[in-house]
Image (cartoon, rainbow, N blue to C red):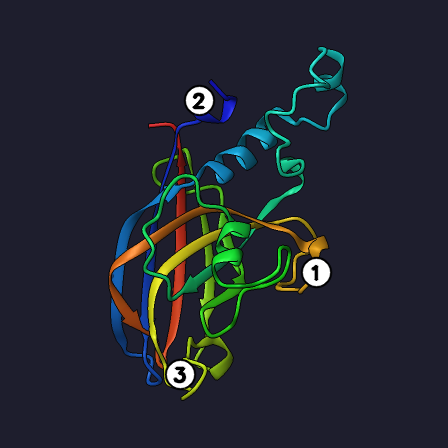
């Protein structure tokens, strides 16, 4: 059994929407699926595969955490919202979703299908339960932070939310293979929600290690 299979992790997303007057309009919370690609990233972080320690205990030829590049080089950096209704399954990968949307490996998603924003808040203390991590990204009341269909420019429903790790600098997104990305987690909303251009949403993600 792979080391990543031994890592117990669960999470929950929360989406909170306010309108142009700052009035609360919508809020939703639900559990998310930690995908295998995300477990690989976390396992690589914990076991530090690039370190001298790992090499010196005779594991340099172990490729179980390097099937798609050394996962320890990735850091959780972004949250994405998108239009796909495909069920969340453990085997999903970032590049796999790119292929479904017709994008080349290593590039960004089509803005009319997925919007990605860098994290602007995170906490590792004063989080309940204590073995949890908190991440947040904001999508503001501007056109570029709103999912719209390509032909008509009309706001469309958010159906999925993704927590994303990247290999590269902090600012996102750049259309470069250098900035390769991996899914940590993905969830599909039971009912789609439309963020209009005048709305702002805060998407928060809480990951909990262990049971």
| Residue where numbered disc 2 is placed | 6
Q: CA distance from mark 2 to mark 1?
A: 33 Å
Of the residues under marks 3 and 1, which one precedes in the sequence?
1
**1 relative position to 156: left or right:** right
Q: Is there CB contact under 8 Å for labels 2 and 3?
A: no
| Nearer the observer, 116 or 62 | 62
Q: Is residue 181 above or below residue 109?
A: above
Residue that sits furthest to the bottom in the current view: 152
Q: Is residue 189 left or right of residue 68?
A: left
- Location of residue 60 (image quadrant): top right
Q: In the image, which is nearer the foreground, mark 3 or mark 1?
A: 1
Q: Which label number is shown at residue 176?
A: 1
Identified at 36% across, 79% down, the residue is: 199
Q: Residue furthest left?
A: 191
The mark found on residue 197 in the picture is 3
Residue ranking furthest to the top: 57
Near-viewer residue (30 or 186)? 186
Quadrant where the C terminus sits is top left
Q: Residue at x 70, y 52 (%)?
A: 168
SS class, disc 3: loop
Residue 29 image position (x, y, % from top left): 27, 55
| Residue 127 appearing in the image | no
> Which of the two labelled residues, at mark 2 and mark 1, occupies the earlier sequence position?
2
The reply to whether dot 3 and dot 1 touch (C-beta < 8 Å) is no
């Amino acid at each position: 059994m792979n080391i990543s299979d031994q890592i117990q992790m669960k999470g929950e997303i929360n989406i909170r929407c306010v309108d142009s007057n700052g009035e609360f309009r919508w809020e939703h919370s639900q559990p998310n699926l930690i995908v295998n690609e995300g477990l690989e990233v976390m396992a690589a972080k914990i076991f530090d595969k690039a370190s001298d320690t790992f090499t010196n205990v005779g594991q340099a030829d172990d490729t179980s955490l390097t099937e798609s590049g050394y996962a320890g080089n990735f850091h959780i950096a972004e949250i994405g919202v998108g239009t796909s209704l495909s069920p969340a399954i453990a085997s999903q990968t970032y590049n796999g979703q790119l292929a479904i949307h017709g994008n080349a490996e290593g590039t960004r998603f089509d803005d009319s299908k997925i919007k990605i924003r860098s994290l602007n808040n995170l906490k590792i203390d004063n989080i309940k339960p204590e073995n949890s991590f908190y991440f947040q990204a904001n999508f503001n009341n501007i056109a570029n932070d709103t999912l719209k269909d390509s032909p008509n420019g009309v706001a469309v429903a958010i159906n999925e939310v993704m927590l994303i790790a990247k290999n590269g600098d902090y600012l996102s997104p750049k259309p470069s293979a250098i900035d390769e990305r991996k899914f940590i987690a993905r969830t599909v909303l039971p009912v789609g929600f439309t963020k209009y251009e005048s709305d702002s949403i805060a998407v928060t993600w809480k990951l909990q290690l262990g049971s």
